[in-house]
Image (spheres, rainbow, N blue to C red):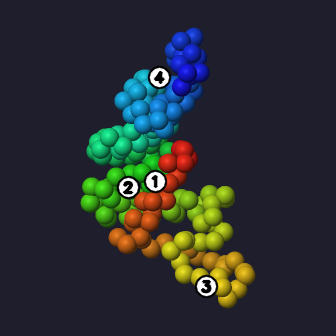
Amino acid sequence: ITVCSKKLKLDPENKKAIFIRASSYLKKNMYKLAIEDCNTLLELDTQNTGAYYVRGCCFEKIGNLDQSIQDFTTVLQIDPNHINAAYARGACENWRGNFDKAIEDYHFALNKDKEKPSSPMRKFGSPFMQHDHTKSNEIPKFEKLELKCTRETAEDLHSKGYQARRNGDY
């Protein structure tokens, strides 16, 4: 935060420094300051998905779910492949009791996640698919992965998205 603040004194429109400081404020639970930095960044770049995402996370943390859903939706409109925004929006919808919308977002995120070359979903399939690894050392091969999300699995999916955000995987 200190380094970014010094950089911003020299160059007040340095987008990278603003974003890093906003993300740092979020991680330190300094939500008001993070939101202010995100607003500044969005004045400079209205298409900055990182600023919308961090601001959405801040709004989520302070309980402003409507605004957080709006920010996560904006992220997905700009970048339809932003998996964490889909997980985060699903979590907000889940907390609001909109389970159908939450499940839709979780399905979307899981399907996008399995498309990533580095995704464990691509290699091992859905964590909700049953496979008895005690009978074989082989990794199961799935020709077609069908994700089925229900209200019971929605909480597990929410936990996955929350854990990614908590670990700083923006």
Q: Which residue lies furthest to the right in this view?
A: 137
Where in the figure is residue 125, as x and y percent of width and height?
A: 59, 72
- Answer yes or no: do the residues labelled 1 and 2 have beta carbons within 8 Å? yes
**Cβ atoms at labels 3 and 2 below 8 Å apart:** no
Q: Tell me the quadrant of the picture where the N terminus can be found.
A: top right
Q: Seen from this angle, which residue lies furthest top?
A: 10
Residue to which mark 4 is pinned: 44
Specify which label sits upstream in the sequence, 4 or 2: 4
Question: Which numbered marker is on residue 132?
Answer: 3
Circle 1 crowding by C-alpha within 10 Å: few under 14, some 14–19, many from 20:
some
Query: Cα distance, mark 1 to mark 2?
Result: 8 Å
State the CA–CA distance, disc 1 to disc 4.
29 Å
* Count of numbered badges drawn on the protein: 4
What mark, if any, has residue 162 been given in the picture?
1
- Work out whether 80 lies above or below 50: below
Q: Name the residue under label 2.
A: 91
Viewer can see residue 115: yes
Secondary structure of the residue carrying tag 1 is helix
